[in-house]
Amino acid sequence: MKASTKNILTALTLTLSVSLAATPALAGSCNSSSDAKATHAMATEATPGIYDLAGEAGFTTLTAAIDAAGLSEVLNTEGPFTVFAPTDEAFSNLPAGTLESLLADKEALTRVLLYHVTAGEVMAAEVVDLRAATTLNGEKVKIGVENGVTINDATVVKTDVRAQNGVIHVIDTVLIPANL
């Protein structure tokens, strides 16, 4: 494993250990970290984790990318997370060769995938009060609420898909971080 990929995964692990209250971009979205835990507890243990739920819902390209990056276990067991999940069509709309290039570069793929994930569980009703959020790759995404909710240039097409360890909001565009 390349040192930079290992550093990203180490940063992910450290980020997961930080409470929602200590995450500045999301701290205002819940009254306290106990509120986040109470919301998280509403999903039953029988509800699949984010990775399994995405697979069951037909996000084949996203789950293949998660597998290639080695993040499936984390996205099933850790959390809570908020995931902005691109549809298969969103992946097919990437410029020719982009997806293949990402799948061949685990470090870049990991950075892209972590750009779709924030720490904590943020439901749609809370997202509309935010203007930005810090992702697990350390970069911010812009949240817009004019004419529907957008994350950068992606439109949120479905909200509040509950998982055992967080929530998925479906988006119509793959988010590519500026540092890529």
Image: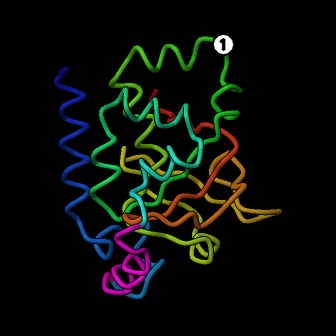
For residue 118, what is the image quadrant?
Answer: bottom left
Compared across the picture, whether 49 is left or right of 77 comes to right
The answer to which of 177 and 155 lies nearer the viewer is 155
Question: Going by the picture, which residue comes out furthest to the front?
Answer: 46
Q: Which residue is drawn at 62% across and 77% down?
A: 125
The answer to which of 135 and 68 lies nearer the viewer is 68
Compared across the picture, whether 69 is left or right of 134 comes to left
The answer to which of 123 and 60 lies nearer the viewer is 60
Residue 156, given in percent of the width and then of the height, sits at 69, 55
Magenta span of residues = 33-46
Looking at the image, residue 40 lies above or below residue 141: below
Whether the magenta-drawn stretch holds residue 34 is answered as: yes
Looking at the image, residue 39 lies above or below residue 138: below
Q: Tag 1's secondary structure?
A: loop
Looking at the image, residue 141 lies above or below residue 147: above
Neighbour tally class for label 1: few under 14, some 14-19, many 20 plus, Cα within 10 Å: few
Compared across the picture, whether 175 is left or right of 94 comes to left
Residue 79, given in percent of the width and then of the height, sits at 31, 61
Magenta segment, principal secondary structure? helix
Residue 66, given in percent of the width and then of the height, sits at 40, 35
Residue 74, given in percent of the width and then of the height, sits at 28, 48
Compared across the picture, whether 114 is left or right of 173 comes to left
Looking at the image, residue 147 lies above or below residue 28: above
For residue 134, what is the image quadrant?
Answer: bottom left
Q: What residue type is labelled 1?
A: Ala
Q: Residue at x 57, y 70 (%)?
A: 130
Whether the magenta-drawn stretch holds residue 95 is answered as: no
- To which residue does mark 1 refer? 96
Question: Going by the picture, which residue comes out furthest to the right?
Answer: 147
Q: Which residue is drawn at 55% across and 51% down?
A: 84
